[in-house]
Amino acid sequence: MHKYLKYLLNAVLVIVIAFAFLYFATRNISPQKEWAVDSNGLLHYPSERGKLEDVKVNLLEDNGTYTIEKVSFKSRDATIYGLLYMPKNADNIPGIIMLPAARAGKEGQDFLARELVKRGYAFFTIDQRGIGETGGSLPSTQDDFNSFVAGNEPVNHLFVYDALKSFDFLKSRKQVDASNILIGGESMGARFAIIAGAVEKNIKGVFAISTSGYGKQSNLAMEGKFMASIDPDWYISKISPRKIVMFHSKSDTVIPFNQSLNTFSFASEPKEFIEMPSVCNHGQCMEMYEKLFEKLDEMTQ
């Protein structure tokens, strides 16, 4: 009896250890499936990112021809807030995701959004992390690098993930043609738009206003690998065979014109570089909208 009990306890112990191993192995593998940086420093997320969670949609305005809704959804550890401009009585419409510049909120896209929704686009823009209703604190680059070294998902990667979840949200709207969604941004937002457009192959094209990469440094040691993972210069060629259009002004006092041209040089065809009028500085300006609308129409045909 004693011998039998000993065998039984050993068998139970083996089962417990097996379940424990399976549990912790799954915990270790799962994040790698959802987030990874390869040996070349390129960030990867899966095309299937799971069901949208905690989605809330509240009507803000209905003027008869289009609606404006405030949207929120869960993205990893954050709740992302956005504004959706949607034409009424229309189906199979093209969509645009717009990522604002650093320290700029979703409300700052209102003029562009209203112009595009009148032209038949669904337009979605968000408060990125650290901004507006989304809020939250942003770590320094050094702290984000330390998080990366520790095996955690850096906030700079989460910016990209939030953009991908924004794509998931917009394509879930039944009026929107899920195969005809562009992503774009200005300044910092455009950097993340380029990376998101390279990662998500179902995004139809990318437009970038007043932005550049960091110079495509060749050092792929740990620090270089992290910098490559957040540098659009390493991703922009991956957008092909979809189109990228970049807009930049020689008068830009934030990001030099030649720096933007350098990033553009890494892109593969089809690509187009539009020099914004000299009266423009950094970001959107009234004088560049006609050309922007023309290119967006071309990209969504």
Image: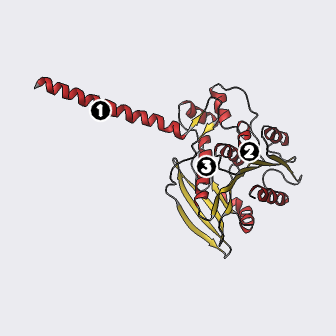
Front disc: 1 or 2: 2
x, y (%) of residue 290?
83, 61
Q: How far apart in space, not on screen, are marks 3 and 1 (Cα)?
A: 39 Å
Percent of width and height locating residue 126: 63, 55
Q: Which quadrant of the rendered structure holds the N terminus?
A: top left
Is residue 62 visible from the viewing direction of this image?
yes
The image shows residue 29, relative to residue 111, as above or below, that is above
Instruction: State the residue position of label 3.
Output: 164
Q: Residues within 10 Å of mark 3 (few under 14, many from 20)?
A: many
| Image side of residue 138 versus residue 256, left or right | left
First in sequence: mark 2 vs mark 3? 3
What residue did someone put label 1 on?
A: 16
Frontmost of labels 2 and 3 is 2
Q: Residue 293: percent from the left, percent from the top? A: 79, 60
Distance (Cα) linking label 1 and label 2: 51 Å
Work out whether 76 lies above or below 82.
above
Residue shown at 53% from the left, 32% from the top: 151
Q: CA distance from mark 2 to mark 3?
A: 19 Å
Q: Residue at image x 54%, y 56%?
A: 73
